[in-house]
Amino acid sequence: MKKHLKKINSGIASIALAPVVLLATCPAFSALPTIQPPAGGSIGGGTTQEGDILGIIGAYLKLGFTILGLVLAVAAFLYVVIASLQRYRDYTKGTIQLGDLKEHVIVSVIILSLVVLMVNYATQTLA
């Protein structure tokens, strides 16, 4: 009998708490703020409309890929500069000749030019 009364009391308590929970969650049903799209536009060069979640996600992906490309270009630049300084150190020690140093610098400039061209092409392709 006591178990039966406990079951009834818990049922009454849950029914009594239902309106309180409903009133407490009413602010959760209010309007959510809109997400501001980035200034660059979405993928394909179009502008994003307000409330277009997929367009905004595409615009942020485009911005993220652009930043990733620039970070990779900076990493390539740093790698080439460090390698060139190492080659210059080897030249001052006398372990390599001037022709090897010139060759390394020319190849480094070509590699950096190609990296910049590829990042520029990728950015324009997304636009």
Image (tube, grey):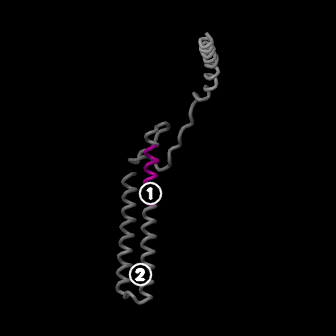
- Give the mark nearest the N terminus, 2 or 1: 1
Residue identifier under label 2: 87
Q: Position of residue 45 (x, y in %)?
A: 40, 48
Q: Amino acid at mark 2?
A: Arg
- Label 2 sits on a secondary structure element that is helix
Under mark 1, the amino acid is Leu
Give the CA separation, mark 2 to mark 1: 29 Å
Residue 88 in the image: above or below residue 113: below
Q: Which residue is mark 1?
A: 68
Instruction: Give the residue drawn at x 47%, y 47%.
Output: 60
* Residue depth check, mark 2 versus mark 1: number of the one nearer the observer: 2
Q: Residues within 10 Å of mark 1 (few under 14, many from 20)?
A: few
Say which residue appears at 45% left-offset and 79% top-offset: 85
Nearer to the camera, 65 or 86 = 86
Instruction: Tell me the SS state at disc 1.
Output: helix
Residue 105: quadrant of the picture = bottom left
Determine the residue positioned at 62% across, 15% down: 6
**Looking at the rendered structure, which numbered label has been put on residue 125?**
none
- Position of the N terminus by quadrant: top right
Q: Is residue 64 magenta?
A: yes
> Which residue occupies the foreground of this view, 28 or 127?
28
Magenta stretch contains residue 77: no
Residue 97: horizontal and vertical position, in percent?
37, 88
Spot occupied by residue 74 in the image (x, y as percentages of width and height): 46, 65
User: Magenta segment range?
Assistant: 57-70
